Image (cartoon, helix red, strand yellow):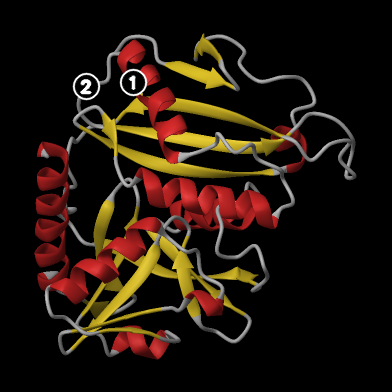
Amino acid sequence: MGVCYINNNGTILPDSSPTIMPKNRSYMYGDGVFETIRIMNGSPINIENHISRLLKGAEVLGIQTPEFYTASFFQERILELLKKSGITKGGRCRLSVDREVGGTYLPKSNDSNFYIEVEEYGANYFELNAKGLEIDIYSDIKLHKNFLSNYKTKSCLGYVMAALNAKERNLDDLFLSDVKGNILETSSSNIFVVSNGVLYTPGLDEGCLAGTMRMQIINLALKCGMKVYECSILPQNLLAADEVFITNAVRGINWIGSYRTKKFSNTMARKLIISLNEFWRNKLDN
């Protein structure tokens, strides 16, 4: 693979060189929001939903964004980087909007800067994992619902620690729960539970991330005539489930093979990932 490029607020640089400004507020304080966007056939997908969540997240943080921060504006700049980086098939893009440099905890300005980076990804379309993931619950840190919970802010240490703990325990991922014990998500994904052909997923009002892939899977399931309920998910619900799978924007759907002693099938996950790929093939062809 050759050199990939980044766009730092309009300046294009190779990712092999220093690319962020000193006193960058994202680097110093996690003061920003971001989106991770899947690339298929050399193009970003689901861009409208990603940019919508990005801008809403910036608004919640009090970061002022200019009117030209639109889906088409960012799509043009992502495509420019993909072309310059030679990425014509599968890839991933990370798009950030951060508060402008200056200040300490109290910012000097609420204006914004953007930062875009791209890289290749091994598969062009979504692929279901061949082996089911082994997963358990992370108990050291609990999620607390607040007005930031539904957005991808850069305050991610809880997820980092969960991912590290999973590795230490030779697991693929860990569920994160709130103080009541309700399971909300994993270190990197939203969660769906399947029982008797019905899908259950934590509601946004419980404090889980408003995942773009979560939204798409709900819509695809409803289109296929499946019932979907947003509700609390407790550990005992996992033990009674037929399937459990997790979703995110880059990997699409990953099925869980086991939670402790409980084993799961992947019938619904296989059906949905076929529908997901068919949707994007049709959309990209047109």
Residue drawn at 57 percent across, 48 percent down: 55
Q: What's the distance in space between the residues labelled 2 and 1, CA to CA?
A: 7 Å
Q: Is residue 49 visible?
A: yes
- 10 Å neighbourhood of mark 1: few (<14), some, or many (≥20)? many
Q: Where does the C terminus fall, quadrant-wise?
A: top left
Q: Is residue 63 above or below residue 76?
A: below
Image coords of residue 89 (percent x, y): 20, 27
Q: Quadrant of residue 122?
A: top left
Q: Is 74 or 275 nearer to us in this picture?
A: 74
| Image-based side of 66 in relation to 150, left or right | right
Task: Kindly identify the amino acid type of the residue bearing the numbered disc 1.
Answer: Leu
- 10 Å neighbourhood of mark 2: few (<14), some, or many (≥20)? some
Helix, strand or loop for disc 2 = loop
Give whichever of discs 2 and 1 has the lower sequence position: 1
The image shows a total of numbered marks equal to: 2
Q: Is residue 156 visible?
A: no
Q: Quadrant of residue 80?
A: top left
Helix, strand or loop for disc 1 = helix
Image coords of residue 73 (percent x, y): 46, 31
Image coords of residue 137 (percent x, y): 47, 72
* Callout 2–callout 1 Cβ contact below 8 Å: yes
Residue underneath mark 1: 82
Residue 88, label in figure: 2
Q: Where does the N terminus fall, quadrant-wise?
A: top left
Q: Is residue 192 above or below residue 32?
A: below
Task: Kindly identify the amino acid type of the residue bearing the numbered disc 2.
Answer: Thr
